Amino acid sequence: MKKICLTFFCLMFINNSYAFTLSNSAAAAFAGDRVTIDVASHNCSNIGMSNQQLLDAANEAAEQYWNDVPTSRLRLAKGGLRSVSSLFQTDVICVSGTDCTPTPALVVSSGILISCNNNSGNFSSGGVLSVTVPNSITGRIINGALILINDRSDNQFQNKSHAEQVSILAHEIGHAIGLGHSAVEDSLMYYRSISTRRALGQDDIDGVSYLYPTEQPIKGCGSIALIDSSDENGINNNKKIWHQHGANKKREEVSPFPQKNTAAILAIMIGMAIPYLLSKCLKISKKYLKYNFN
Ligand SMILES: [Zn+2]
């Protein structure tokens, strides 16, 4: 019985805690399901790839990492080359001396913009690969975000493999959509393992699902069934609602009542067992205290 009690209390204290953080205190995220990624049209001097190649790599990052999370509604779309001020190449991303007040000239009004940049305030060395700020936020809505890639002559971005560059872009896109760094090493958003990640970790999935939860969660049970083509309206299938999927006679059944539900039965059994276990454990605790402290 003691073992059961210990297990029971251990289970009570197991906590599915999250380690992801958010890139801003407002917990802001893009409002729509679809966010476009553009690349500034000016030429980069030192990153070793053209604007179009940078756009292709960013799209690869979106597809390989962020667009494949079933519990996230976010879909990143490939945009194009956007003509912007040359200040995006040379200016600092945050007003110096502030806790990152966005530089007004670099505010991105919509979507995600990637630009190369050589400002020493952004890149103190060639080892700083990139900086990202969601720099247009209204309340809890991100309107636009800016990703700057280090374009100094000594930048280390140019020396990375293509897979590493895609991974770095995916990490920066993570910041752009509202995520901060994760404390979990097995995450794309962990600050040190960027180059070696090839997929999202569970903490990244938790983070993007928190900011961009899918809508219309499934409630109750559902199943797919084939019905006779002569029964188009489900007349002979009383008390069932049918929704047609195209013209192939496949139907989705939505029963008004839940059917066999193993999870529900288990939940009821556990619920009935909890009062019994609690009373037993309290008795054992009392005996233990009496034995040790009397
Ligand atoms: Zn980062």
Image: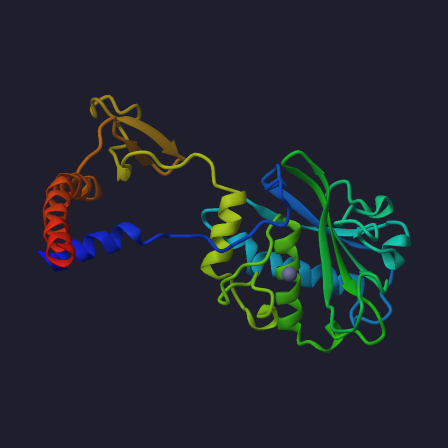
Q: Which residue is nearer to you in this view: 235 or 272?
A: 272
> At x 57% / y 70%, what residue is drawn?
193
Name the image quarter holding the C terminus.
bottom left
| Quadrant housing residue 275 | top left
**How many badges with numbers are in the image?**
0
Left-right relation of 128 to 185 = right
Q: Which residue is nearer to you in this view: 30 or 191?
A: 191
Residue 286 x, y percent position in the rendering:
13, 49
Q: Which residue is nearer to you in this view: 162 or 204?
A: 204
Residue 42 x, y percent position in the rendering:
87, 58
> At x 87% / y 58%, what residue is drawn?
89
> Does residue 236 lie above or below 48 as drawn?
above
Residue 97 x, y percent position in the rendering:
82, 52
Taking the image as four quarters, which one is ligand 1 found in? bottom right
Left-right relation of 191 to 149 = left
Q: Which residue is nearer to you in this view: 13 or 164?
A: 13
| Quadrant housing residue 165 | bottom right
